[in-house]
Image: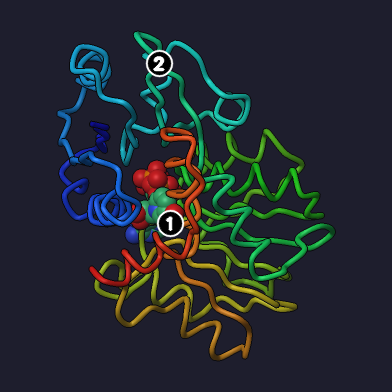
Amino acid sequence: MKIFCILGDERVFSSKSTAMFTAVLKRIGIKGAYTPFKVEAGQIGAALQSLRVLNIDGANIAVPYKESVLPHLDILSEGANIIGAVNTIVRNKNVLKGYNTNAIGFMDTLEEIGYNASNKSAIVFGTGGLAKAVVFILNWLRSKNIIVAGRNKDKIQKLVSHIAGEPMLLKSMTSEPISANIIINATSVSSPDESPEMAALINKIELKDCELLIDLNYGRNNNFWKDMADAKGIKFIDGVNTLSNQARRSFALWTKIDVDPMEFRKAVYEVL
Ligand SMILES: NC(=O)c1ccc[n+]([C@@H]2O[C@H](COP(=O)([O-])OP(=O)(O)OC[C@H]3O[C@@H](n4cnc5c(N)ncnc54)[C@H](OP(=O)(O)O)[C@@H]3O)[C@@H](O)[C@H]2O)c1
């Protein structure tokens, strides 16, 4: 019997990961369970100790604990250490090792659509855990100019300080056209319901030279990122691809079984 879980705040109950991993465990015939747990602020260390005590085989870490979980882990993978965020934990006896499969999942997405990001300019919206993973991969793939756009100056600065990137405050983006081949949304918002301010701002920004838009959110109605891609006539990829790719990578770390990412994708579409 294999037991996995996802730890986060109250948003953990709306994550599609539970349905996705539950379906995949069943499909490939592994006896097991995947359960969401809400962890109160300040309790992530105690929650990690519970993984040891309860012999949980593996866990996903969701917002807002991807960074604060780091000091409570015994080892970090090289990628998680550089990125400074963890979304997957593997337990081996009492030892908890943290990984970042958001990063490799995003890279898998670029690869599956055949997009070579080397020498391409990019703009990444957002400065949270996922944005860090995306910026790490773009930098690794040798994108030539990475703009990080957000609403918090310190967070933007911290993120671009790891790369030769360009900081940009959201509110300053409407003054002149901005050139970027790839647009990536790594903020939590994609629809006017979630943020009328962001919807209005995106409408006003003039982005040129764009070839591809990846929104890392999924299942949103009235997606203003998709509207932008449609208006520019460029390819739009939503977050289900990266979600299923990173899930496949987490699952392989836990079970050493490489399941086709389409199995994860099918499971997500069943619950969207
Ligand atoms: N597809 C996938 O595989 C995948 C994987 C992980 C996460 N996600 C999704 O990606 C999103 C980001 O995840 P995360 O882990 O990076 O979360 P996070 O650490 O909480 O970061 C959220 C980011 O969104 C920004 N933001 C939130 N509301 C905003 C608004 N109204 N206007 C402008 N910016 C806003 C935040 O800015 P401030 O810092 O200024 O608040 C922050 O930069 C979430 O919606 C999550 O569900 C998708």
Q: Position of residue 59 (x, y in %)?
A: 32, 32
Give above or below for 192 relative to 263: below
Tell me which colouring the rendered structure shows: rainbow
What crowding class fits label 1: few (fewer than 14 Cα within 10 Å), some (14-19), or many (20 or more)? many
Q: Residue furthest front?
A: 29
In the image, is residue 165 above or below residue 171? above
CB of residue at label 2: within 8 Å of ligand 1? no
Reply above or below: 46 against 30. Answer: above
- Tell me what residue is drawn at x 68 percent, y 33 percent: 162
Q: Position of residue 61 (x, y in %)?
A: 34, 35
Identity, as a three-letter code, of the amino acid under mark 2: Asn
On-image quarter of the N terminus: top left
Q: In terms of depth relative to the viewer, which is nearer, 88 or 1?
A: 1
| Residue at image point 48% right, 64% down | 241
Write down the quadrant of residue 251 in the picture: top left
Residue at horizontal 27 percent and vertical 18 percent from the top? 48
Q: Residues within 10 Å of mark 2 (few under 14, many from 20)?
A: some
Badge 1 amino acid: Leu
Q: Residue at x 48, y 34 (%)?
A: 253
Image x and y of residue 181, in percent: 72, 70
Q: Nearer the viewer, mark 2 or mark 1?
A: 2
Whether the residue carrying mark 1 lies under 8 Å from ligand 1 is answered with yes
In the rendered image, the quadrant that contains the C terminus is: bottom left
For label 2, the residue is: 92
Say what secondary structure mark 1 lies in.
helix
Position of residue 48 in the picture relative to residue 91 (left or right): left
Q: Quadrant of residue 164?
A: top right
Q: Report whether 163 appears left or right of 244.
A: right
Question: Which residue is the site of mark 1?
Answer: 243
Q: CA distance from mark 2 to mark 1?
A: 25 Å
